[in-house]
Amino acid sequence: MFRSRIAPTPSGFLHTGNACSFLLTEQIVRRANGQLRLRIDDLDAPRARREYVEDIFETLHWLGIAWDEGPRDAEEHYSRYSQQLRGQRYHQYIDALIAGGQVFACSCSRKEIQDRSADGQYPGTCRNRGIPLDTPGAALRVRTPDPCIIRVPDEREGLVEVNLAQTMRDFVIRRRDGIPAYHIASLADDVDFDINYIVRGADLLHSTAAQLYLASLLGETKFTGTRFLHHPLLTDEGGNKLSKSAGSVSLKSWRERGQSPETLRRMAARWL
């Protein structure tokens, strides 16, 4: 069975880039007579506000997107589907990586990393310091050899090679506040819910490579067989990516102005 998902993050109101990606995913799933799951990535509790969760449902209904699995409203999300209910599962992956000797603790702050890095990547400061893994306030990182070549099967570009040692060196799998990192949670959810086709923006190609690397370390062959499509990014007239972080106009404002989502449907169709 062809199975895909849409996975909005409730850290802000959804924007036009989200809409086109979700519409594209739905169109691909329906053409394949597959199933579509709604997953809300709310593991980062301090940033995941309820108004943003409610905005997800309002936006999906406005876009006319129908999903086959997952929560139908905010109440059901919090009671049955929230990632915050799955913490034990995510820590199983972290424990397995630790048992395999793939993990080290890092006490560096973001500023310290920036100050010491010549290429913007983690400089390996704590790699061989032997910091105890249970040190309060320490992040956990997975070791990436150099080179660490990951081959990503992309539906548009074919087999794309990514060297994680250059793009996401020794990336974090558990944050300094103890929360499992996105890559761990996303991998566990995709494996557990039998997702075999993932649609993402081109800016997440390196995230795909990181998750494929984790899957290989964990022996998750089901995920390493997943098909991926990394679509182009929507940009404004200046060529800047449309995103929440870039301050793009939210879909909430589109709805409030009574605008139709038809323009977004046409934009997503151009990616097919």
Image (cartoon, rainbow, N blue to C red):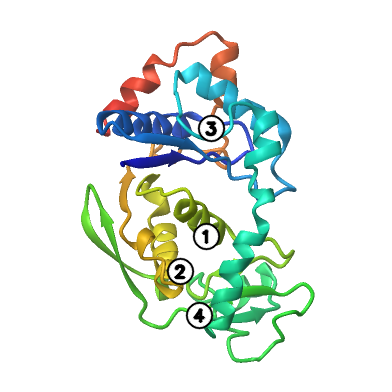
Q: Earlier in the sequence, mark 1 or mark 3?
A: 1
Tag 2, which secondary structure?
helix
Q: What label does residue 143 carry, if any?
A: 4
Q: What label does residue 214 carry, if any?
A: 2
Tag 1, which secondary structure?
helix
Instruction: Residue type at mark 3: give it.
Output: Ser
Q: Is residue 23 left or right of residue 243?
A: left
Along the viewing direction, whichever of 253 and 117 lies nearer the viewer: 253
Q: Is residue 106 visible?
A: yes
**Residue identifier under label 1:** 183
Q: Earlier in the sequence, mark 2 or mark 1?
A: 1
User: x, y percentage for residue 25?
Assistant: 36, 35
Q: How far, Cα to Cα, is label 2 from label 1? A: 8 Å
Instruction: Residue type at mark 2: give it.
Output: Leu
Q: Earlier in the sequence, mark 4 or mark 1?
A: 4
**Residue identifier under label 3:** 248
